[in-house]
Amino acid sequence: MNAPVIERPPAARRPEGGGLPARRAVIRWAIRLLRREWRQQALILALIAAAVAATVIASAVAVATQPTTTAQFGTAQDAATVSGPSAQVTARVAALRRQFGRVDVIETRTLPFPGSVQDYSLKAQDPHGPYGGPLLALASGRYPAGAGQVAVTSGVASALRLAVGGTATIGGITRTVTGIVTNPQDLLDQFALVAPGQLPDPDQATVLFSAPGTDPGKLGPGVTSVGQAASGNVINPQTISLTAATLGMLLIALVGVGGFTVMAQRRLRAFGLLAAQGATTQDLRLVVQANGVATGVLGAGLGLLTGLAGWLAYRPTAQASAHHVIGPWQLPWTVIVVAVVLAIAASYFAASRPARAIARIPVVAALAGRPPAPRATGRVAGAVGTAFLVAAFLLLGVAGASTGGDGKAVGALVLGFVALAVAIAALAGPALSLIARLGGRAPVAVRLALRDLARYRARSGPALAAIALSTLIAAVVCVASAARFGNVLDYAGPNLTASQVVVYTAAGPYGGITRATPPPAQGGQGKAGPPSSAASDAAADAKAATAARAIATSLGAGAPVALYSAAAGLTHAGPGRNWSGPVYVATPQLLAAFGIAASAVRPDADILSMRPGLPSVSQLELYYGAGAGSGDGGDGGQGAFPCPAVSCLAAPVVQAAGQLPSGTSAPNTVLTEHAVSALHLGPTLTLSGWLVQAPRAVTAAQATSARGTAAGAGATIETRNSIPSLSVIVNDATTFGIALALAILAMSVGLVRSESGRDLRTLAATGAGGATRRTLTAATAFTLAFSGAVMGVAGGYLAAIGFFRTSQLDGLAALGSIPVANLLLILLGTPLLAAAAGWLLSGREPSMITRQPPD
């Protein structure tokens, strides 16, 4: 009898390439590879962590330090601002209350600090109002509850020497001080707080209310909504932070390409063994890509923790700088999450390029440890880079043509810089090939270094692009800052030096506007001697003059320099080109104080100025008479050129006078005797104040004492503000660019030279000494640094030319103030420092000359 036949089910077909189990095994091996070789990948980890941490801290500072809509609206959705006479303010507030019912009214009246150009507010507000709660906080004591009570901020208490429990006469009424208050949304808001209804004559009121679903334009004049405030600033810190994060992660990708390429080629034999055992091309690629993702996750996690710790440590300083309360977790989480995701994505894409190259290597070549020969892509890369360069130039031109800051301009600006970064990355490889050809007649060690850069451009190309991007950032900041701070019309920077004090009379810096005087006594025809004040103001001016001399004596200064102003002002006929700063009169006393001889002034000169480039400005107009002298030329810079003959002088003659002081509140631009006589400005000349030049910086205690002296005479003083100068901004940008470029260079040179270890061993075996090894490293560092600096500075100026060529405000004239010294420091200082560091740190003889190092 035949045995029964048992049919077995067919065996399950194994998926091609091992399927999911194989991929899991490959991913586990990639993670173990990261654990074993973390020292080799420490540079990439450190770069990712540093970029993410910098993004977290920078975005937190940029976003959290900006005033929010809460600073204006509290918890309301709409706000109406009413100003004018007290009766008008009261009537408008009553109308809004009838219209919307539930409102929160904050009434204010502005009062001057005695002896200072600063002022403060007398404010009536309900501490428990429905919308204004975030705008008021109690530091000590209690809120005022009725008539005869007041609470003050710490600044008001210090300036007026008040204490809780004492009395204060504010606004002509004596009240008891009940507490110390503050505005958490604006720590610079100095005010005295009274209970609602205790401010009988307000000159301004803010009415907070909510009218959801109503068009703000239909709510009446002076009404703003939260939506309008949020959408009015398209170029906001969050957008800037996202753009910076994107460029930073592009920097990570560029440097990461080199690092992952070195890692992949170091494990080339291991990949060959894996392929010999049946691993597919996708498996080999997955090893490097999984290693890249793991590196990105680890680096982003470390960077996130480091950034949060750094923010918590820096938050008190940021809060003091921003002048409003910042919560510990008041962070732009959208930007932070995007930065973390971009860091992981940058690591993945940086690993994808070497992953594809490794997967294409034949098994035999991989087992032999022979890396793939670089592909000749110079022409294609050059064409792509040129195309993106042209696109960046055009996009930045679109951004520059818009003066409204709309979405189109923002998009064009961001895309323009991204296209410029892509162009630099694409042109880096061809640039290295060109450099290698140009160095054909260089010494042997230098020639070897240049050829290594061209041969290993899979690593050196991204490194060069990263260095160029870092110097591009510094160059853009330098050029943009010079364009802004170098605007001779809208002059920016510190108001005075640290050793200068200006004592103002009651007329202030623009005395010619507020009061007119009889013609001054002159020494002769066309001679504008020191004018005399009107009889009604003589006593006040005499008291202020006595105070100015007393302040000068207390500071150890010489005699104060009298400052006279006239009813005259400068403007520019072009749109948006306003004049900023006072225009004083060049009296003989003022000229002598700054070492300017009368004979050095041209007979036909109308204006003397230290502002560089002002003598060559066209369409300049000098307005005089009633309404002039306000600093904007009377028409806000929108006049026609040439200006009308009445009360206007077209194209006044401007003479450069570098001896004049440079502060925005100092007499940096003055009218000459010729202009005063020709325009008959004598009747409008007014004593505005005195400039005191101390031998050393004025301390806070001296400033407080001077303020008290001025207050006693009915005058005010002005001291240096905290606005940075152009040199400070440009120097900081230069330092940042050089430091970032050197950090990237250190990583890149280490990667490039580690891959040429065999060449170093061969050179050592043939008798090459330490000088040759030092020359190799120094030449590599110098070439990368110099080429990157040239590309970065050239890209920065290309971006500036593309932007300003279509600008309606300045045009290419904005690029006239070139920070030559700083750009030369970037171009020459960076490569010289890199070469010196490479020479000093690379003299050690390589180990294991007779055998290859283990995998």
Image (tube, grey):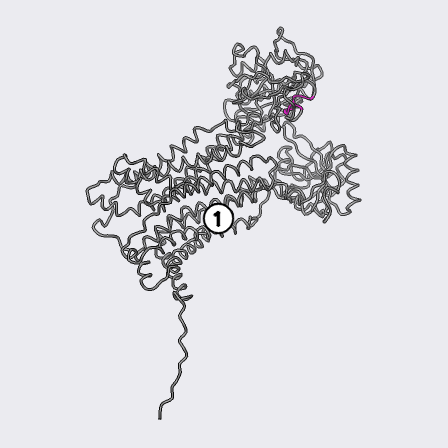
Residue 711 vertical placement versus 109 (above, below): above
The extreme top residue here reads 524
Residue holding disc 1: 307
Residue 173 vertical placement versus 380 (above, below): above
Which range is magenta? 627-634
Element at label 1: helix
Question: Amino acid under label 1?
Answer: Gly
Seen at 30% across and 38% down, the residue is: 839
Q: How many numbered markers are drawn?
A: 1
- Quadrant location of the N terminus in the rendered image: bottom left
The extreme bottom residue here reads 1
Q: Position of residue 798 (x, y in %)?
A: 47, 34
* Front residue (pair 252, 538): 252
* Front residue (pair 251, 2): 2
Q: Position of residue 362 (x, y in %)?
A: 31, 56
Q: Position of residue 311 (x, y in %)?
A: 51, 47
> Does residue 111 appear left or right of residue 380 in this picture?
right
Is the residue marked by circle 1 packed among few (<14), some (14-19), or many (20+) residues within 10 Å? many
Q: Is residue 630 rendered magenta in the image?
A: yes
Q: Residue 441 sits in which quadrant?
A: top left
Which SS type dominates the magenta stretch? loop
Residue 66 vertical placement versus 554 (above, below): below
> Does residue 260 appear left or right of residue 323 in this picture?
left
* Front residue (pair 383, 151): 383
Q: Is residue 104 rendered magenta in the image?
A: no
Does residue 124 appear in this view? no
